[in-house]
Image (cartoon, rainbow, N blue to C red):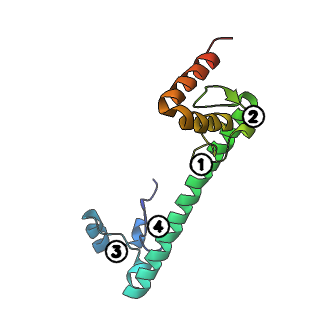
Amino acid sequence: MRDIEHTCYACARTLPLAQFSVSDLRNHKRGDPLLCINCAVLPQSDLALMVLETTTRNLRARYETIAGRKIAKREARQAQYATVGKRCLDCHAHKPVADYDNNARNPDGLQHSCRACKKLYKVTRGEGGLVLWHTVRQAMRDQNDKPA
C-alpha cells in the first residue's frame, strides 16, 4: 500500500504524511496551509521568504508553460499557412503570409486583413465612407467565395 503524501506550503516538497504534525493536519482540514515539520519550526520571517520564493517559482513555471503553448500554437498556424495561405478577413482570399503585417496580439502573430485590403479600406473610407467600403468588401468576398 502506498503512503499518503502531502505538499508543504513553504518548501513545496512532497513528503509522506509522517513528516507533518498532527495539529497541522487538523488545521489543514479547516483550510490552513500545511507545513512540514522542518518548515514549522522556522522563524516567521524566514517562513515568509520561503513561501514567497516557492510561489514565485511556481508562477514562473506556469507562465513559461503557457508561453510555450502559445508559441507552439503560433508555429503550427504558420506551418499551415505555408501550404494553404492565410485567409483574409475582408476579401476572403487565401494569400501568403508575406502579404500580412505583423501583430503580436493575434494568436498567429499576423494582422487579420491583408495589406491590399487595408490600403483599399483607407482609400474607400476617404472617398465614400463606410457604405462604399462595405459594398466593395462584399463584392470582393462574393468573387473569392465562388466555387472553383
Mark 2 or 3: in front is 2
Q: Check residue 21 in the rendering and tell me which mark sits there, or answer none.
A: 3
Q: Residues within 10 Å of mark 2 (few under 14, many from 20)?
A: few
Q: Are marks 3 and 4 in contact (CB under 8 Å)?
A: no
Name the front one of labels 4 and 1.
1
| Residue type, label 2 | Ala
Tell which tag, 3 or 1, sits nearer the viewer. Answer: 1
Give the quarter of the image for residue 27: bottom left
Distance between mark 2 and mark 4 Cα atoms: 49 Å
Q: Residue at x 75, y 29 (%)?
A: 83
Q: Nearer the viewer, residue 109 or 15?
A: 109
Q: Earlier in the sequence, mark 3 or mark 1?
A: 3
**Residues at circles 1 and 2 in contact by the CB criterion of under 8 Å:** no
Which residue in the protein does label 2 denote?
82
Give percent across and percent down for residue 126. 55, 38
Front tag of 2 and 4: 2
